[in-house]
Image: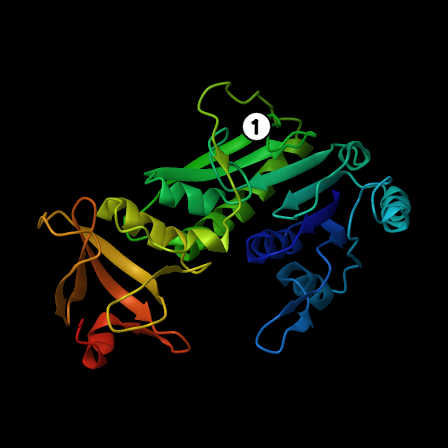
Amino acid sequence: MKIGFAGTPAFAQAALETLLQSEHQVAVVLTQPDRPAGRGMKLTASAVKQTALEHSIAVLQPHSLKLDGRYPQEAADTQALLESLGLDVLIVAAYGLILPQWVLELPKHGCLNIHASLLPRWRGAAPIQRAIEAGDQQTGITIMQMDEGLDTGAMLLTEAIDINERDNAQSLHDKLAKLGAKMIVQALKKLEQGELIAWPQPNVGITYAHKIDKTEAALQLGLPARQLAQRIRAFNPFPGATLTLPGITEPVKVWDAVALDATVGQTPGTIIAVTHEGIDIATGNGTLRLLELQRPGGKRMPVSVFVQSYSGA
């Protein structure tokens, strides 16, 4: 099949790399415009663009696909090029732009989306992080027929995986990216054979995974320890959870922690113990043990190293 691919970050890159190894022809790639990144804030190509260029695939980077939006000429040029290709299907994975109706209708078989949740739970921008933050025990991949709604289209394939109690957003991302790459190839095979059957999403169990905001990073120690530990894992690697420790003027980043069931009756935020095993802090319910920390301007380090220069006073 002649396919187009629309995606931007590493999650999408995994699917593109797998498609390039398949029998299908990737005719064009759409991805977000280059963005400033790194300490030098140099313009940097997306992970998907880098893979596309390595395989000499045409890359389109419109700022918008809306023909009546802020960039109508870019959208019109993109439309003309896509129409000339005669695509069978457009595969979409974490692209980051809204697809207007003309895009959804352009390929012969429409647009298939690789979504990192078991829909209708966690529609939206941050399904991996929100699933961990909520303490979900399972998540998965849904291959979906896209429509104009926010992740509201009919489902085509689903597969669940367990969320390990030590998973963070990065480790779960990597598992789901690999699963999504496998499943989209399966979906295309079923599509070719006329066996890809769509069914509507349930009307119950709908939740929204709102985009992660940096303002959410600060930990509120009045919350239960288990909820705080889930948030720390959900925000690793971005934006990184933070808290202020006695004796350190600026907030430190907390990259890993576990909840202890011990209830000590101390005011939330009180340092209970500082050992090579962890820094124990009282919370609204239970004790939070910090395991990996980063001082402002410093490097990430295990707590056994961190406490060598920290007394907790």
- Tag 1's secondary structure? strand
The residue drawn where x is 32% and y is 48% is: 230
Give the image's coloring scheme: rainbow
Image position of 189 with respect to 222: above or below: above
- Residue type at the position of mark 1: Met
Toward which corner of the image does residue 297 lie, by quadrant? bottom left
| Left/right of residue 220 with respect to residue 174 in the rendered view | left
Image position of 156 with respect to 246: above or below: above
Residue 179, image x and y in percent?
48, 46
Given residues 24 and 84, the one toward you in this image is 84
Q: Quadrant of the N terminus?
A: top right
The residue drawn where x is 64% and y is 51% is: 19
Given residues 7 and 194, the one toward you in this image is 7
Instruction: Note whether residue 9 is visible.
Output: yes
Given residues 248 and 185, the one toward you in this image is 248
Report which residue position mark 1 lands on: 155
The residue drawn where x is 46% and y is 55% is: 174
Residue 40, image x and y in percent?
62, 78
